[in-house]
């Protein structure tokens, strides 16, 4: 027996064994995600407001971090810039909590435009791909993204009541399904 064989492993195999032992917890986490996603899909307005609150909270935390970082600056110009940016984030976070539907409306509008730009970029990139590449799938993905963004913008501001909640719900369902499948694969996996 060599020295490497006698010491406990810290490689990929030991990590796999550690995860395999916790497969039940991974499946349970996936089920919780899926249930939360289904709840969000049934209450899209409430899920939209919840997602806006999370964004507002993140802006507030980021603003406080910017302000703290501002005190690390050595020049007055940078100090004032960092403090101003931090205060802007904090104010935006507070305004998000005060009027979540307005914030949802603005976030939905930005999401719609971002999807349109992303769809156009995918189509342009796909048309520049060479032969033998899956350019058709990239074009299809770009068209779907472009149309989704167009539908969101076409129904705005009404779409701001449900779009963020639907995106949150779908994301949670798919994340949960992936955790369940990973946990079940770990359960059935054989070690070498």
Image (tube, rainbow, N blue to C red):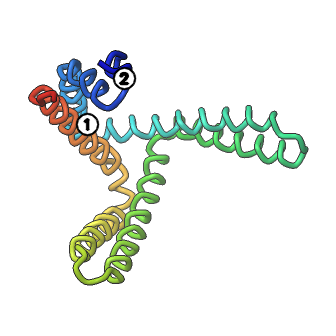
From the viewer's perspective, tell me whether residue 166 is left or right of residue 100: left
User: Where residue 105 sits: x, y (%)?
Assistant: 44, 52
Measured along the vertical axis of the image, is residue 13 above or below residue 111?
above
Residue at 32% in and 35% down: 46
Residue at 78% in and 38% down: 70
Q: Nearer the viewer, residue 175 or 24?
A: 24
Distance from the alpha carbon under mark 1 to that under mark 2: 50 Å
Disc 2 on helix, strand or loop? helix
User: Where residue 16 sits: x, y (%)?
Assistant: 26, 28
Q: Nearer the viewer, residue 186 or 152?
A: 186
Residue at 43% in and 65% down: 113
The N terminus, quarter of image: top left
User: Where residue 187 sits: x, y (%)?
Assistant: 12, 26
Disc 1 on helix, strand or loop? helix
Q: Nearer the viewer, residue 184 or 157?
A: 184
Residue at 30% in and 48% down: 167
Query: Which residue was labeled with disc 2?
Result: 4
Measured along the vertical axis of the image, is residue 137 above or below residue 58?
below
Measured along the vertical axis of the image, is residue 10 above or below residue 146?
above
Number of marks in picture: 2
Measured along the vertical axis of the image, is residue 157 above or below residue 172?
below
Query: Which residue was labeled with disc 1?
Result: 40
């Amino acid at each position: 027996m060599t020295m490497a064989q006698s010491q406990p492993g810290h490689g990929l195999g030991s990590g796999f064994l550690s995860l395999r032992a916790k497969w039940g917890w991974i499946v349970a986490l996936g089920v919780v995600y899926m249930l939360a996603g289904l709840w969000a899909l049934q209450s899209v307005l409430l899920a939209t407001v919840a997602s806006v609150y999370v964004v507002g909270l993140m802006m507030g935390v980021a603003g406080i971090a910017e302000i703290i970082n501002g005190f690390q600056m050595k020049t007055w110009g940078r100090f004032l810039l960092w403090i101003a940016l931090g205060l802007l984030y904090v104010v935006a976070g507070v305004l998000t909590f005060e009027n979540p539907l307005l914030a949802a409306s603005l976030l939905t509008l930005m999401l719609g435009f971002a999807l349109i730009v992303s769809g156009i970029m995918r189509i342009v990139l796909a048309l520049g791909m060479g032969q033998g590449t899956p350019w058709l799938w990239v074009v299809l993905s770009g068209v779907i993204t472009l149309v989704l963004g167009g539908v969101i913008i076409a129904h705005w501001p009404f779409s701001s009541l449900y779009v963020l909640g639907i995106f949150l719900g779908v994301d949670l369902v798919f994340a949960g399904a992936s955790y369940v499948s990973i946990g079940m694969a770990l359960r059935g996996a054989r070690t070498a």
